[in-house]
Image (spheres, grey):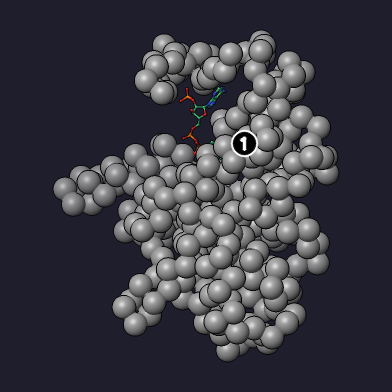
Amino acid sequence: MRSLKLLASPKSAGKAIKFKGEEIPVETLGEDSFRGVDTALFSAGGNTSKAYAKHAVRAGAVVIDNSSAFRMEADVPLVVPEINPADIQTHRGIIANPNCTTIVALMALYPLHQTFWVKRVIASSYQAVSGAGAKAIRELSLQSESFFSGAPSSVEVFPHPIAFNVLPQVDVFLESGYTKEEVKFVNESRKIMHHPRLRASITCVRVPVFRAHSVAIHAEFQQPVSVDRARDVLAKFPGLELVDDPSSMTYPMPILASGKNNCQVGRVRVDSALDNGLAFWVCGDQLLKGAALNAVQIAELLAR
Ligand SMILES: NC(=O)c1ccc[n+]([C@@H]2O[C@H](COP(=O)([O-])OP(=O)(O)OC[C@H]3O[C@@H](n4cnc5c(N)ncnc54)[C@H](OP(=O)(O)O)[C@@H]3O)[C@@H](O)[C@H]2O)c1
């Protein structure tokens, strides 16, 4: 019999979540939680994944992990189903869901790579607060209310106020000066696209947007590019929608991409600072395609 089991920390035990008309109680995660489970979707942070994924695998489940705990391990496939579905076949119990910004960016970069072969990428992200979890959504709401009422506001999740501000920091800084989020983009893009020699650099920025990440991408390709050809391959790529009509000021925006399964790409133009260069702008709901939806698509691939 197919059934759903919901696991969380002791804080949530006793709550119930409605699924297909049925109230399903939330249980506390434990080492023995996975008996009888065939697919386990983990999304509780890297430490929880590291502590419990092995128990799930031992119980016979395939783990689809949303954290960064296993993404770069050689025997763990890192999968975006529209890009590298065949990689799931190599799994040994754990399949990793890529970083949210990386998924959104690659949904537009990969079809262009298939057509023109990408050599170099320079990008900037504009990342929604929900990418940092439920507490971060509350923080932006509370800081916005305080801003208008003049009341003092507190800063807990982010290192500085996020309301009416932008933070050029997502995750912690590394010795190189890049943040961990920026390094994830480079390493994960290479792994997913099977392109170990890709040269990439990104500045990841947190913006006061509740939902949906945006990425401005400047890419240099091996082959000569054309905007018409680029638009054509982008429009045909599954899971991606071309939203690109400068004459009517039509382009992707977080408010358009929020709640949608498809990522959206627009502002496609020749990048005049690069050889065979294209510049474009992609938005995607990072809670859906950047996390939950991608994990469910992996589960569907597995089931097939
Ligand atoms: N948000 C995104 O856009 C996004 C995108 C891609 C990947 N991710 C990754 O997904 C993971 C979760 O992120 P999130 O944004 O969903 O965070 P979140 O809003 O803080 O939710 C975390 C969830 O994990 C549960 N949890 C925490 N500690 C636990 C424990 N010890 N045992 C069992 N359950 C526990 C929490 O349950 P309680 O409420 O009961 O504590 C809650 O349901 C992270 O690894 C994050 O990097 C997030």
Residue marked by disc 1: 300
Q: Position of residue 247 (x, y in %)?
A: 34, 82
Which residue is at a point 34% across and 57% down the rendered structure image? 255
Direction from residue 28 to residue 303 in the image, left or right: right
Locate residue 70: give its quadrant: top right
Instruction: State the SS at label 1.
Output: helix
Q: In this view, which residue lies farthest toward the left?
A: 149
Residue 229, compared with residue 215, is above or below; it is below
Which residue is at a point 60% across and 30% down the rendered structure image? 42
Locate residue 244: give its quadrant: bottom left
Q: Residues within 10 Å of mark 1 (few under 14, many from 20)?
A: few
Q: Nearer the viewer, residue 147 or 152?
A: 147
State which quarter of the image contains the C terminus.
Answer: top right
Locate residue 257: give its quadrant: bottom left
Direction from residue 16 to residue 131 in the image, left or right: right
Residue 117, compared with residue 44, is above or below; it is below
Q: Position of residue 86 (x, y in %)?
A: 76, 47
Direction from residue 183 to residue 45 in the image, left or right: left
State which quarter of the image contains the N terminus.
Answer: top right
User: How many numbered dots are placed on residues in this image?
Assistant: 1
Q: Can residue 67 be seen in the rendering of this structure?
A: no
Q: Can residue 252 be seen in the rendering of this structure?
A: yes
Q: Nearer the viewer, residue 80 or 11?
A: 80
- The type of residue carrying mark 1 is Glu
Residue 47, compared with residue 203, is above or below; it is above
Q: Nearer the viewer, residue 255 or 20?
A: 20
Which residue is at a point 79% across and 40% down the rendered structure image? 89
Q: Position of residue 65 (x, y in %)?
A: 65, 35
Is the residue at mark 1 in contact range of ligand 1, meaning its CB lies under 8 Å from it? no
Q: Position of residue 71 (x, y in %)?
A: 72, 43
